[in-house]
Image (spheres, rainbow, N blue to C red):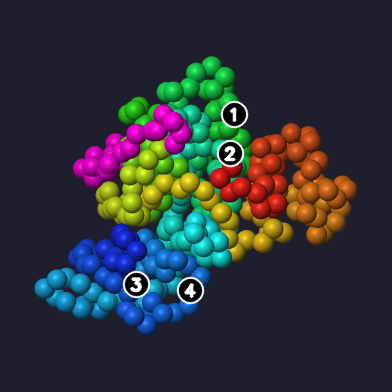
Amino acid sequence: MKGLIMRSTGSWYDIADEQGNKYIGRLRGKLKQEEMKSNNPIAVGDYVDFEIENVEQNTVLINDILERENYLIRQSTHRKNQAHIIAANIDQAMLIATLVFPRTSLGFIDRFLVSAEAYRIPTLVIFNKKDLLEGDGLVFQEELVEMYKKIGYESLAISALDKNDIQKINALLEGKKTLISGHSGVGKSTIINHIAPYLGLETGDISDYSLKGTHTTTFAEMFEIRPKTYLIDTPGIKELGLIDIEAEEISHFFPEMRERFGQCKYYNCTHLHEPDCAIVKAVENGEIAQSRYESYLSMVMGEDNRK
């Protein structure tokens, strides 16, 4: 039988078959023993082959993971040589960011975009809590929205308290499997609750001391909010370490750099110190945002992945 992983707790999985029947499944022993680079061999969004284990308890055994169209991964927090798969087989990712309470760094946003670009996943950059900004803060936010739009990303500034803004987000989800991600406290669960209030997701407070959010989503879970429209809610990400991407490949996942390939003097230009580098010239001329170039440098140098 074929099923879709709707929820992962690490050892047990909620599975929906093609008729919409629900099961609780676990990995068959031999699949567990296979050497895997990931600390979670099965992710929400995976399609699996399974068989009934216990009819009365509605449990099944997962025999195989079907080939993925794509997936979004990050470096495991505890094991740097292992990956953690955030979700698989998604149509788009929606990164929720905030400039205050808590603040999402531009470096974190750009790392997320690079991770998505590496697996050809379209990404929307949504700045939430615009109602908490004023003056220069609002101007800066609008500049960021325009910057990301310019390089090809759908970007919006919203307030999760504004019904019109929620309607805009809702329209972007139609007919797709969308991963919603971001730091804890940026409003992921609040946005989902406004879109699908019957889910009743728990929301957390922001710590006055750290200005960081508290985790309310423990496990990744996918919800079908209407026919063929799915949302994947994920635990807040504190840091986003790149994995399986070599330093010399990183520029390939910056669209504004990729479109200038072939214009540098040297074919193997690292865009760091070489003469007649088209990327550096574009930064100097304001054609590539300074913040984006700084994010690139941070990734190439392997610096703090929370920045």
Mark 1, other Cα within 10 Å: few <14 / some 14–19 / many ≥20 = few
Label 3, on which residue? 48
Camera-side mark, 4 or 3: 4
Residue found at x 28% / y 53%:
224
Camera-side mark, 3 or 2: 2
Q: Which badge, 3 or 1, comes first in the chain's sequence? A: 3
Q: CA distance from mark 1 to mark 2?
A: 12 Å
Residue found at x 39% / y 73%:
65
Q: Secondary structure at mark 4?
A: loop
Picture mark count: 4
Residue type marked 1: Glu
Label 4, on which residue? 36
Is label 1 in contact with label 4 (beta carbons under 8 Å)?
no
Q: CA distance from mark 3 to mark 2?
A: 36 Å
Q: CA distance from mark 4 to mark 2?
A: 32 Å
Q: Is residue 72 magenta?
A: no
Q: Secondary structure at mark 1?
A: helix
Residue found at x 34% / y 34%:
205
User: Which residue appears farthest toward the front when viewing the image?
Assistant: 209
Q: CA distance from mark 1 to mark 4?
A: 42 Å
Q: Is residue 165 above or below residue 265?
A: above
Label 1, on which residue? 143
